[in-house]
Amino acid sequence: MTKNSCNTKLIAGAFIVLTVSVIAGIITMIIFYKTQIGSMNPTDRPPSVTTTEQPPPDRRLPKNLVPESYKVFLKTHFYHRIIEVVNVTTPNQTTVFNGNSTVNMKCVQSTSSIYLHSRRLEVSDPVVMNRDNPNEEIRSSVVYPGEADFLEIQLNVALEAGGNYSLFLNFKGQSLEYMDGLFLSMYSEGVPEYEGDMEPARFLAATNMEPTFARTAFPCFDEPEMKAVFNITIIHRSGTKALSNAVIASETNIIDDEWEYTVFDQTPRMSTTRSIRRQHHRKYPPVLREEVWNHYSLTKLDQIALPDLNPTAMENWGLVTYQQGALLFEEGVSSLLHKESIAMIIAHELAHQWFGNLVTMKWWNEVWLNEGFANYMAYFAVDAVEPSFKMKDVSVMSDLHTAFEEDALAASHPLTVPPGEIQTPHEILSLFDSITYSKGAMVLRMLADIVGQNVFDRGVNMYLSDFKYSNTDEKNLWDNIQKAVDDDNGVINEHFLFNDSSESSLWWHVPIRFVKMSSKSDFPLMWLDDKPVTKGDFITKNGDWILANVNCAGYYRVNYNPENWDALSSQMEQDQSRIPLMNRGQLIDDAFNLARAKLVDVTLALNLTRFLRNETELIPWMSAMTNLEYFVLMFDRSEVYGPMQTYLREQVRGLYNFYRNYTDHSQVPSDHSSQHSQILAVRVACHNGLPECVTMATEMFALWMKNDTNIIHPNLRSSIYCQAVASGGKAQWDFAWNKLQSSNDTSEMEQLRAALSCSRETWLLNRYLQYTLDPEKIRFMSVWNVINLIALNPSGQALAWNFIRANWEFLSRRGGHSLIAVVARRFSTEFELEELVRFVTDNDLAYMKEEQAVEQISVNIQWVKEHQEKILQWFEMETAS
Ligand SMILES: *[C@@H]1O[C@H](CO)[C@@H](O)[C@H](O)[C@H]1NC(C)=O
Ligand SMILES: *[C@@H]1O[C@H](CO)[C@@H](O)[C@H](O)[C@H]1NC(C)=O
Ligand SMILES: *[C@@H]1O[C@H](CO)[C@@H](O)[C@H](O)[C@H]1NC(C)=O
Ligand SMILES: *[C@@H]1O[C@H](CO)[C@@H](O)[C@H](O)[C@H]1NC(C)=O
Ligand SMILES: *[C@@H]1O[C@H](CO)[C@@H](O)[C@H](O)[C@H]1NC(C)=O
Ligand SMILES: *[C@@H]1O[C@H](CO)[C@@H](O)[C@H](O)[C@H]1NC(C)=O
Ligand SMILES: *[C@@H]1O[C@H](CO)[C@@H](O)[C@H](O)[C@H]1NC(C)=O
Ligand SMILES: *[C@@H]1O[C@H](CO)[C@@H](O)[C@H](O)[C@H]1NC(C)=O
Ligand SMILES: *[C@@H]1O[C@H](CO)[C@@H](O)[C@H](O)[C@H]1NC(C)=O
Ligand SMILES: *[C@@H]1O[C@H](CO)[C@@H](O)[C@H](O)[C@H]1NC(C)=O
Ligand SMILES: [Zn+2]
């Protein structure tokens, strides 16, 4: 999956964080409905899904039966049309679905019960057959063994090891409104279907199966290793269309006036997903990297934008689904950053067709094999199609920093978690985090750097072909990389020592590469343990310096002695181009984080931001802004903030003026990387109150309000809207709100939704929070995002925290846990810590995310106490001169 995106003000939305699940649903079905606004009652949200946590032991299926194929008939009942003609009684909309499934399975160990997964389904009429001896009579009955997710079929005889059996079941369920399993979604189209009435609403049904929701659509063996082939038939209302993982075998089979059915080809062997269409296929060859990944298994790959979906995107095999905003780009409306994130998300989902769908991890504890690979491969895929995006640099930097940040907490976890710790649906979902996505990708990148890209690609290629249609653990990957290394004569394999047992020591052997620079000449790149390095190589004098982790290929941080830091810092102030671009970003990131860990003085890190005054490249700025964001969170309600903003204004002024002529004319430079820098300049300048920026934003927005023509360039809209709403009042807010209501473009809507959270008026922010409770105002899917955005605004943070507590019942259902982590980011006092702990205790929320939040606050309290005075002095001194 692709993670939910979380925009921050400073680096606003430049990067969508990829999160989600790997093996999503087995089978994906999408059915489009058209209907006039019916009586599907939108406020009637289903009861809380808080999982009833079962105590251990094992929540896993016994492995005595192995599914081989399924035949599933699924009938969705909602109406194609509900015409409210006065004199006709029309039926109300319905969310019911029903069907039957037959699973053929092999018995590997004798048993007289069949366990499989089923949740929120009414299951009946079990028929168990011995396929080797159809005359054998087997009587069976359905039992729900208390565990919410299991279904037990008890038999009067024992099934025999080696035998082939089938199980038939009828089932019935309801599509609920939260976006799990088979769900309904309503949308409207621009063109009214008939005259004289409001725009008709249309309905569609879609599925989201990852990680544990397939069991809510039909009874199945819902574990990643239980791969099988699927034959799907969907029965749907006439005039609608159904899609699934595989291609359509036969369509428009009329049953009667009201019903037709669509039969799909058999899928390949898979966990729960699939589909690519040939003509699309041709467009993607560079993205699909078939030379490395092997051929795509299916004959089609549909990509569908949905009005509702959580996560951002889901990689169903052959039928990838996206939130509209994650897929749809409109020239002239969507910004450059949006285009980049769309490219990255698509590439991520396409990579999953191999990493996740074709080859799947054995169990969720190693879900990084899916997500780490998908993130990692996306850099190459996008780079192949749009080299000007420089995604290999930009995204790598962002993944690297994200991973480091989360990894620095004691509540972090290893990439591969012991399987016993990942049992419940909640535990499984909690693994879809930055460690899994970003650190997973960084570890792969480091590995590729050490063994060499060609060797790595060959190893991955073997891994994919050895394990296609089946399951792996990380050892399978290491073995294949090692094999590729050995084929390549084995020179470097001793450098690489990956612990394959997760319990083993915390020591990690990493190869270190560095460069030394003297006034005379540059030394070549060196490996730390290569022969030519002697102790003398580490001695520097007269402003010479050593730089380690060149191009940040390694997943580790570097600290230097004070003299070397000083030399690096001076070098950057004099001529930063002698330090490779990525390292300019990394030096800042390392210094700030070492300062957080008290390994260097915080002023050393701040000193390293001085050169930004001359820096026009994105990566160092991005790195500095990300790190200073922590300062912003800790200090934006304190006296430090004034001098800090003054300093940042001065740093960014040159960059802002460099692009000013473009900005003032609402134009953008032609090359990609200058566009990036311009976006950053406007964002940082406006956010820190650079007067020329504030004036520009206010005037442009006023112009739009005045004659209803929006001339603001899409790249600059999010900053300008935000600034205009922040420095404006009710008129600006209402104008933006009305534009949001009437817009039908997802990027525009996203920008407006974010801008509305920038207000400094508490009453406006409060009203906005209240709107999240009304699905006619804020879609369910966006509730999380809106509260999140408000919490990031210093004027909205306390409001959001109160709001979350007051409405926990409602919010806990979706994203509630992530919300707490976000709202608590600014907490830095004992009082705030107590409040959070009380809330966590009262609501029984002792999960990983909450633990991390609590740990983070203790860190914050300590940090503020120790650093506030010194930081204040530093900013005052810098801005005095
Ligand atoms: C319903 O009303 C329409 C006109 O409004 C009429 O043509 C039709 O015959 C009526 N149907 C019934 C069942 O009364
Ligand atoms: C439709 O729903 C409304 C209100 O929910 C109810 O009063 C009415 O009886 C329903 N009509 C049918 C045909 O079920
Ligand atoms: C399963 O459902 C399909 C479609 O409704 C139906 O045609 C078929 O007879 C059902 N199978 C059994 C064994 O009842
Ligand atoms: C089960 O099916 C497999 C192949 O489909 C066959 O080889 C095997 O003999 C069957 N088992 C029994 C007990 O007949
Ligand atoms: C979106 O809205 C604009 C006017 O606001 C309209 O011209 C356009 O056709 C709409 N597009 C769609 C796809 O509905
Ligand atoms: C599934 O469909 C394929 C044809 O696409 C057919 O050969 C196969 O027998 C079917 N399997 C089941 C279990 O019905
Ligand atoms: C900016 O760079 C110029 C040379 O390119 C240098 O003279 C100047 O000192 C630098 N300024 C800062 C603040 O680093
Ligand atoms: C930061 O820069 C100032 C001024 O150049 C210097 O006095 C101070 O020692 C530096 N701090 C560190 C920790 O290097
Ligand atoms: C500023 O932009 C305008 C219009 O885009 C252009 O005509 C003018 O030459 C530019 N001025 C400079 C100094 O680049
Ligand atoms: C609105 O203002 C813009 C920019 O000044 C101008 O190009 C446009 O023609 C105006 N539109 C109307 C309807 O007046
Ligand atoms: Zn993913």
Image (cartoon, rainbow, N blue to C red):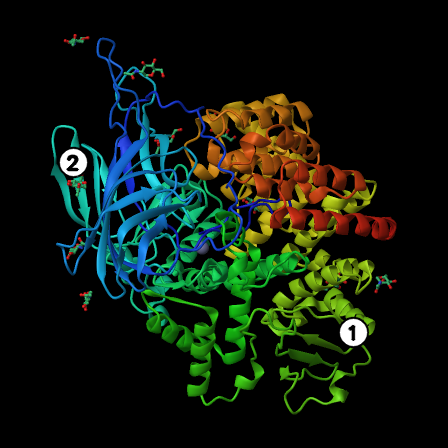
- The alpha-carbon separation of the residues under discs 2 and 1 comes to 74 Å
Q: Is residue 382 left or right of residue 868?
A: left
Measuring 54% from the left and 39% from the top, which residue is drawn there? 717
Quadrant assignment, res 104: bottom left
19 in relation to 478, above or below: above
Measuring 39% from the left and 51% from the top, which residue is drawn there? 24
Callout 1 crowding tier (Cα within 10 Å): few <14, some 14–19, many ≥20: some
Residue 348: image x %, image y %?
A: 43, 57
Q: Which residue is mark 1?
A: 564
Residue 542: image x %, image y %?
A: 82, 79
Residue 491: image x %, image y %?
A: 51, 89
Pick whichever, 792 or 426, lies toward us: 426
- Counting residues from the N terminus, which is met first, the one under dot 2 or under dot 1? 2
Q: Is residue 645 left or right of residue 164?
A: right
Measuring 30% from the left and 62% from the top, which residue is drawn there? 110
Q: Does the beta carbon at disc 2 come under 8 Å from ligand 3?
A: no
Q: Quadrant of ligand 7?
A: bottom right
Q: Are marks 2 and 1 in contact (CB under 8 Å)?
A: no
Q: Nearer the viewer, mark 2 or mark 1?
A: 2
Q: Is residue 693 visible?
A: no
Residue 826: image x %, image y %?
A: 71, 42
Amino acid at the residue labelled 2: Glu
Q: Which residue is mark 2?
A: 260
Pick whichever, 323 or 722, lies toward us: 323
Residue farthest front in this picture: 156
Amino acid at the residue labelled 1: Asn
Callout 2 crowding tier (Cα within 10 Å): few <14, some 14–19, many ≥20: many
